[in-house]
Amino acid sequence: MNKFLRWLPALLWAIFVFLLSAMSNPPIPGSHFPMKDKLGHWGLYCVLGWFIAFALRRAHNLSLPKTFVLAMLIGSAYGASDEWHQWFVPNRTCDVMDWLADTLGASSAAAAFYAYESHRSAKANRQPA
């Protein structure tokens, strides 16, 4: 049960992304500027990438390099499946550049998680003076 709870945030976020992708006209907040949708993809997948990295590390006790690589691959694969899903949604398209933004988002979060965990581990291993 503990492993499931560690994966729950990633699962819920993946469902949220799926539901957004199923909308013909998803809500997009804020002003209009070039590449806004790519930034949105990047941000959504940053959150997913962090949750995936967290689950891999905490539920399966993987090394940081394995956590980093698997979080990138899982996030990228989910992004690819999300783009394929959009192919079947009216007014949506399957876009390689969106998938690239998804992959970069998941990779950015996996790298940030790696840095955070490395710092946290180094700090915990320091000996008092």
Image (cartoon, rainbow, N blue to C red):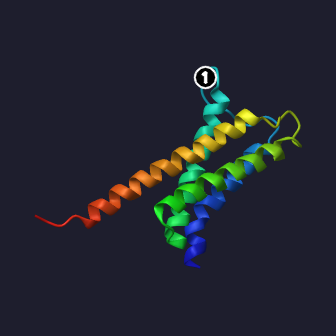
Above or below for 92 versus 80: above
Tell me which corner region of the image, top left, top right, bottom left or bottom right, holds residue 21. Answer: top right
Q: Where is residue 77 in the image (x, y as percent from the top left)?
A: 71, 52
Q: In which quarter of the image is residue 125?
A: bottom left
Which residue of the protein is positioned furthest toward the left in this rendering? 129
Q: Between 63 and 35, which is closer to the camera in this rendering?
A: 63
| Residue 46: x %, y % from top left | 56, 46
Residue at x-position 64% and y-position 20% = 34
- 38 horizontally vs 111: left or right: right
Quadrant of the rendered image containing residue 71: bottom right
- Establish if 50 lies above or below 41: below
Residue 38 pos. (x, y %): 65, 32
Compare residues 55 and 72 and report the one nearer the observer: 72
Identify the image quadrant of the N terminus.
bottom right
Q: Residue furthest bottom?
A: 1
Quarter of the image with the C terminus in it? bottom left
To which residue does mark 1 refer? 31
Residue at the (56%, 49%) spot, across then down: 47
Three-letter code, disc 1? Ser
